[in-house]
Amino acid sequence: MSGIRPGGPVGQFFAAAERGMAARAGTNQTPAMLDKVTKATGNVLKAAVKEGGAAVKQGPASYAATKAFDAVRNADRFIDSVLTNGARRSSPANIVGTPTPAATFTADKDRYGQKGPSSNVTGLIKGAAELAQFVWAGYNHGKLGPVSIAPATLTQGGKSIPVHLVGISGTDIVQGQSTSLANNPSVAFGKNNPMFANAKAAILATVPKGSNLVLAGHSQGGMVAQQLAADKDIQAHYNVMQTVTFGSPEVMTGKPEGTIKRIAANPDPVPLLNSRSLGAGLEKWSPADAVVAKVADAVVRRNSNQQLIDSDFGSKWMGFKSHIDDYTNESNGQLSQMDALGRRVGVGETGATLQVNLGQRKFFSSPVNSTGRVITP
């Protein structure tokens, strides 16, 4: 545990955690186990900030930031070990692609702010909210899987071209599915993780080489979409045109191809939870400051690819209600001004649209312990 005082709060936590929690990680990532992982991670970060605050009194702020980052790295390694242990104790599973007709979604409950049938039923995506509805179909309790891929026609500037639209939903507690809370740190730090590996395998196995790609994701899924846009294998075989994320942090990984548009609701805390924002907050840390306020100020002002929208929920549930519901709202003032590629459209301008071929849409599972083999009917 380089950089962490063995007798300090972070060191004490890891000593206890490594003895107990990793050993108790069961065959699957059950909600109870994931709750323990989440609380454990929170304890690490709180302890890191506490140690950083003490370090400020002893030396420069950069020393405090270094101490805290050491703690975060160790937290990341600890969660990786939990994931690895869980994967080793579960049976390897294939990535299964399931053809899914539009009729599958006709009886689904409308998403917040949805007007009429969703894009999962009509196939027409005219704006960012309808793109979010396409992504949200991945929240299906593991019945279909969190990743969906469909051929589509992108129309912009009076011209139409063929693309493949990839939708990736976010954190979802489903037994055996790699969308758990514990997967988030590896994704945020741009590390390899089962969600990314499975989505990549599904694309390589089913999308014809040389195709144009439009990637879209929510929360953890948006981070995975950014990883895919920066992946050398994906870039070698495809033309990544656009990546649109909803409520997702910026991922520190490689050089993405194409344009990235990150859409974030004002009170949503999740887009701020990345390594860059953590560093920005901790470097300005002092006992009188609120770390979260520093993070928000540093990140929102610096990230030019982030577009803010207002919320119908404010700080309800500490902003997480906004994280869940604001992005599918077709009545949201700012969101309604964004086209199907997440770009703001001026008055009198015509934005891009996507017409999805729902008859060829497939959903893909994302097992925790994946064989990497993609099976489609």
Image (cartoon, helix red, strand yellow):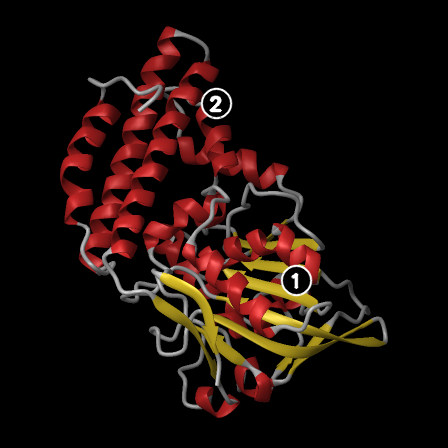
Image disc number at residue 6:
none
- Could you say whether the residue bearing mark 2 is in a helix, strand or loop? helix
Above or below residue 231? Residue 41 is above
Please rate how many residues cluster around mark 1, counting C-alpha atoms within 10 Å: few if below 14, some from 14 to 19, many from 20: many
Decide which of 84, 148 is in the foreground and name it: 84
Relative placement, left or right, of 128 versus 141 is right
Give residue 180's position: percent from left, percent from top: 33, 57
Above or below residue 115? Residue 333 is above
Residue 255, by quadrant, is: top right
Alpha-carbon span between mark 1 and mark 2: 32 Å
Relative placement, left or right, of 276 versus 193 is right
Quickly name the residue at label 1: 342
Decide which of 318, 109 is in the foreground and name it: 109
Q: What type is the residue that disc 2 sits on?
A: Glu
Which residue is depicted at the point 34% across and 32% down? 74
Which residue is depicted at the point 61% across and 67% down? 128
**From where the camera sits, is residue 371 visible?**
yes
Q: What type is the residue that disc 1 sits on?
A: Gly
Image disc number at residue 283:
2
Q: Report the number of numbered marks.
A: 2
Give residue 86's position: percent from left, percent from top: 26, 54
User: Which mark is first along the chain, 2 or 1?
Assistant: 2
